[in-house]
Image (cartoon, grey):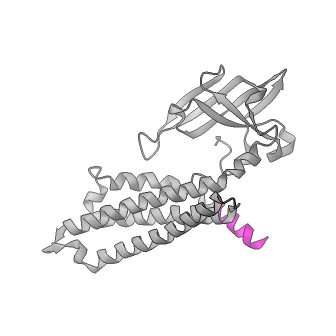
Amino acid sequence: MEPNAGSDAAGIETRAEKRGNKWVLNGNKHFISNRANADVVMVMAKTDKAKGAAGVTAFIVEKGTPGFSVAQRQLTMAGPPEGQAELVFEDCEIPEENIIGGVGLGFKAAMASLDEGRVHVGAMSLGAAKRLLEMSVNYSKQRVQFGKPIAAFQAIQFMLAEMATEIYAAEQMVYNTAWRIDNGESLPTESAMVKLFASEMVGRVADKAVQIHGGMGYMAELPVERIYREVRVLRILEGTNEIQKLVISRSLLK
């Protein structure tokens, strides 16, 4: 992402200019995950402004390349260790062989990876939701109010039932779509559906988990509040959920 290019991925402003047998990158990126641990980054840059998305090229940039630096670590609402980074490129020279796929094919390469990336978000959502349900079931059996475990109360039982049902639905979507992609199918619409449903699902599950845990669910003493904060980003990354709805609706209406 860039400061002025989020959902509008084709609107990136980082530029790459050919000089001799090298490409020179200028621009900056932000909200880049895992930059602190990465030895290599893939950078999208405009190589032909007039061509729009067809003028975007993907480059490999290695750690320590002159002109490539990390300007700042950007902390998130999830807190450490989920910090993001801002990357800066100032006359950063990249050899021709570091181009991925070919000049002008960067946007196409990025879009081709979205199916898997969006199913990956679905899997992350599923794993977090299962853990939240497990903790909620265990806590409801242990927490005693009015002389009995809160699991005995219908209000708690109904929340657990709703959590489990949504998790089951998401699991079928994630596994089926992942299996079909592994078998060579291109599933942009289904992948968008998985990302949309699963990331929304885990948000609802996390909210119920906090409610079941009551005051303890709000305390940093238990991991529930941390997971509640961490899963919020899943509705944003790999394309916001609003973008997923556009992908799905356009597929229906084309």
Residue 124 horizontal side relative to residue 217, left or right? right
Q: Residue at x 69, y 59 (%)?
A: 184
Seen as rendered, the residue at the extreme front is: 183
Coordinates of residue 95 in the picture (x, y in percent): 75, 24
Question: Magenta span has 249?
Answer: yes
Main SS class of the magenta portion in the image: helix
Q: Residue at x 57, y 51 (%)?
A: 237
The answer to whether residue 239 is seen in the rendering is no
Residue 27 horizontal side relative to residue 18, left or right? left
Seen as rendered, the residue at the extreme left is: 147
Coordinates of residue 89 in the picture (x, y in percent): 67, 27
Q: Nearer the viewer, residue 29 or 33?
A: 33
Vertical side of 199 occupied by 6: above or below? above
Coordinates of residue 209 in the picture (x, y in percent): 35, 64
The answer to whether residue 34 is seen in the rendering is yes
Q: Residue at x 63, y 36 (%)?
A: 29
Coordinates of residue 35 in the picture (x, y in percent): 54, 34
Seen as rendered, the residue at the extreme bottom is: 154
Q: Quadrant of the C terminus?
A: bottom right
Q: Quadrant of the N terminus?
A: top right
- Counting labels gives 0
Question: Magenta span has 250?
Answer: yes
Residue 149 horizontal side relative to residue 88, left or right? left
The magenta segment? 244-254
Seen as rendered, the residue at the extreme right is: 50
Vertical side of 224 occupied by 201: above or below? below
Vertical side of 158 occupied by 32: above or below? above
Q: Residue at x 43, y 47 (%)?
A: 78
Vertical side of 117 occupied by 97: above or below? above
